[in-house]
Image (tube, rainbow, N blue to C red):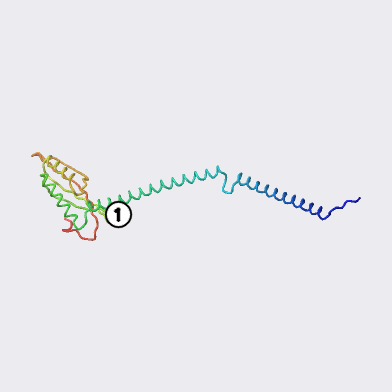
């Protein structure tokens, strides 16, 4: 007796089985592709390997540390420059003589030192020399001759050393007199004049 087969049902099952196999193959291929991508990213990530990234991070930290140290150094240098400028300006104000009063102040200080030490002043000679590299400073040279004892001269030098004015002793020559225990001395001092666009009071002696 012949059997009855349901051909549409059989064909539908086959198609479903074939469709299931296709999608399984697609899923397997997608999974393999994903695994390949993951392995590639692990072995060669876009930003570099873990070791490379750690080395880059360490290098960046070193650069930041060096930059901070350089910033601190520059701040220190800047502060020192500002302090130097302030101290330089203060020094110039105190010790550089304005031309308007330079000669008057120098003469007055020399007379004070001679009177305090007991030396007798004989004469003075003045000259000026430009200071190389500056536009407003001049070197004032004062050669003064004195007469007195050795003790008077030592006291005079002490007064010059303690003078509030910047009088720099350049040369000193002394010769004894033939009698009386007295000596003749010639001293050359130097002072710095700051040009202020004015004329010295009293002029150059």
Q: Position of residue 190 (x, y in %)?
A: 22, 49
Q: Position of residue 89 (x, y in %)?
A: 27, 53
- 18, above or below 198, in the image: above
User: Which secondary structure lies at badge 1?
Assistant: loop
Instruction: Name the residue located 30 percent from the left edge and 54 percent from the top edge.
Output: 134
Left or right: where 121 falls relative to 83: left
Relative to the observer, which residue lies in front, 164 or 203?
164
Q: Mark 1 Cα within 10 Å, few/some/many (few <14, many 20+)?
A: few
Spot the residue most to the front. Answer: 1
Q: Quadrant of the C terminus?
A: bottom left
Q: Position of residue 168 (x, y in %)?
A: 22, 47
Left or right: where 131 falls relative to 122: right
Relative to the observer, which residue lies in front, 107 or 46?
46
Spot the residue most to the left. Answer: 180
Q: Position of residue 103 (x, y in %)?
A: 18, 54
Instruction: Name the residue located 65 percent from the left edge and 48 percent from the top edge.
Output: 34
Which residue matches tag 1? 134
Give the number of marks: 1
Residue 159 position by quadrant: top left
Instruction: Name the residue located 21 percent from the left edge and 44 percent from the top edge.
Output: 171
């Amino acid at each position: 007796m012949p059997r009855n087969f349901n051909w549409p049902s059989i064909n539908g099952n086959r198609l479903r089985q074939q469709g299931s196999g296709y999608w399984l193959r697609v899923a397997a291929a997608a999974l393999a592709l994903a695994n390949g991508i993951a392995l590639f990213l692990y072995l060669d990530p876009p930003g570099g390997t873990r070791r490379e990234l750690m080395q880059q991070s360490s290098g960046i930290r070193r650069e930041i540390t060096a930059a901070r140290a350089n910033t601190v150094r520059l701040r220190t240098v800047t502060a020192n420059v500002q302090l130097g400028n302030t101290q330089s300006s203060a020094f110039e104000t105190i010790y550089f003589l304005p031309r308007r009063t330079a000669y008057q102040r120098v003469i007055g200080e020399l007379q004070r030192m001679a009177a305090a030490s007991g030396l007798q002043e004989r004469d003075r000679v003045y000259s000026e020399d430009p200071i190389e590299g500056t536009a407003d400073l001049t070197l004032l040279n004062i050669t003064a001759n004195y007469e007195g004892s050795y003790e008077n001269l030592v006291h005079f030098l002490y007064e010059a050393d303690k003078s509030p004015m910047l009088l720099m002793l350049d040369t000193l020559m002394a010769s004894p007199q033939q009698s009386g225990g007295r000596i003749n001395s010639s001293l050359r001092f130097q002072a710095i004049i700051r040009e202020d666009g004015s004329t010295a009071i009293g002029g150059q002696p």
